[in-house]
Amino acid sequence: QVQLVESGGGLVQAGGSLRLSCAASGRTFSRDAMGWFRQAPGKERESVAVISRSGGSTNYADSVKGRFTISRDNAKNTVYLQMNSLKPEDTAVYYCAARVGLGDEYDYWGQGTQVTVSS
């Protein structure tokens, strides 16, 4: 059974940092591009960061560039999202996802972890 399990969310003050982890099991995720997404109450889900299979290529939403860093450890089947200089508008449920093919659709999703940034 394929599983993605996020951890590391919580409550932090504005300006603080959190590191999210996404542990994958059930398949070899080193073959997959991985992404972090977030969804705030009343808003649509948005892409935050994407990392290629090897980790050599990354992309970020404009709203998090320079503050967030996505990375992966294929030996541990784990993807990370380091979030610095957090803002209240970063408050959301954060999800990791795996993209198996070359298209835009993500095939596997985690259950999400809540990040709350207080002002």
Image: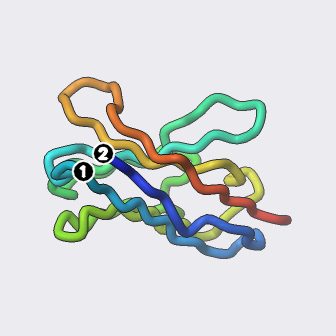
- Residue 26 marker: 1
- Percent coordinates x, y for residue 29 in the rendering: 21, 51
How many neighbours does mark 1 have within 10 angstroms: few (below 14), some (14-19), or many (20 or more)?
A: few
Question: In percent of the image, x 56 and y 49: which residue is there?
Answer: 112
Type of amino acid under label 2: Val
Q: Looking at the image, can residue 95 be seen?
A: yes
Q: Is residue 116 left or right of residue 102?
A: right
Quadrant of the frame with the C terminus: bottom right
Q: Position of residue 34 (x, y in %)?
A: 31, 47
Mark 2 and mark 1: span between their CA atoms?
Answer: 4 Å
Which residue, given by chain and number where applicable, does mark 2 sit on? 2
Eyeballing the image, is 101 above or below 67? Answer: above
Image-quadrant location for residue 8: bottom right
Mark number for residue 61? none
Q: Find residue 6 and report its horizontal and vertical position in percent.
A: 48, 58
Instruction: Indicate the quadrant where residue 12 lies.
Output: bottom right
> Which residue lies at the image location 75% right of the left edge and 63% below the top edge?
117
In the rendered image, the vertical position of residue 95 relative to residue 55, given as above or below: above
What secondary structure is marked by label 2? loop
Residue 60, given in percent of the width and then of the height, sits at 43, 47
The image quadrant of residue 114 is: bottom right
Please say if 61 is above or below 20: above
| Residue at the image point whose x is 67% and y is 53% from the top | 90
Q: Secondary structure at mark 1?
A: loop
User: Label 1 amino acid?
Assistant: Gly
Mark 2 and mark 1 in contact? Answer it, CB < 8 Å: yes
In terms of depth relative to the viewer, which is nearer, 3 or 49?
3
Specify whether 106 is left or right of 118. left
